[in-house]
Image: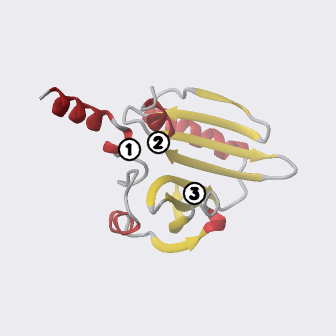
Amino acid sequence: MFKIVFATVLMLLSPAAVATPLFQGTSTDMTVSEVLTTVPDAKQVHDPESGFGPLAPCLARIDNYTIGARRFEVCFIFENERLKSVMMRMIDKPLRLDYNDLVNSVRSKYGPEIGEAPSELGRRADWVTKDGTDISINWFNNSLLQGLNIVYSAKAASEAGKL
């Protein structure tokens, strides 16, 4: 009996057993078809260059998603054909004002960030929601790279499972 209870508790506490919400109703470990059903504007693609390389490709995308007047490309990134993160890249050249406005919007929805500081490439702000979703806003503004992205992932939740 103890073995059954112990195995059940381990399964329930395992990070793989609980999907973490990401973006617009999606959650970690969804398949491409589940993402396409959940997000009707998304289309299936296979674009290893727009994800995190060949091991974490972008397999679904929204080409033009707007937040206010800002336009984003939304990339659903998969590992082993399971959704791991969502990256939104601002299409137009971002300004510091865009970064500040988005940080303030996320702050008003989720509360204070766990960190906000200059980075080597620009600025970065991070949150972890009550559901375990990591949200990062990155503004790149240097001679090599200019851009703004918002990343939804479950990194902290999966790392907590190692404790």
**Residue at 52 percent of width and 33 percent of height:** 127
In the image, residue 115 lies at what x, y percent? 60, 27
- The local secondary structure at tag 2 comes to loop
In the image, residue 119 lies at what x, y percent? 75, 35
Along the line of sight, which residue is nearer the eye, 92 or 153?
A: 153
- The local secondary structure at tag 3 comes to loop
Numbered circle sitting on residue 154: 2
Is mark 3 in CB contact (under 8 Å) with mark 2?
no
Query: Mark 2 Cα within 10 Å, few/some/many (few <14, many 20+)?
Result: many
Q: Amino acid at mark 3?
A: Ala
Q: Quadrant of residue 123?
A: top right
Q: Amino acid at mark 2?
A: Ala
Q: How many marks?
A: 3
Q: CA distance from mark 1 to mark 2?
A: 6 Å
Query: Mark 1 Cα within 10 Å, few/some/many (few <14, many 20+)?
Result: many
Q: Quadrant of residue 1?
A: top left
In the image, residue 98 lies at what x, y percent? 65, 46
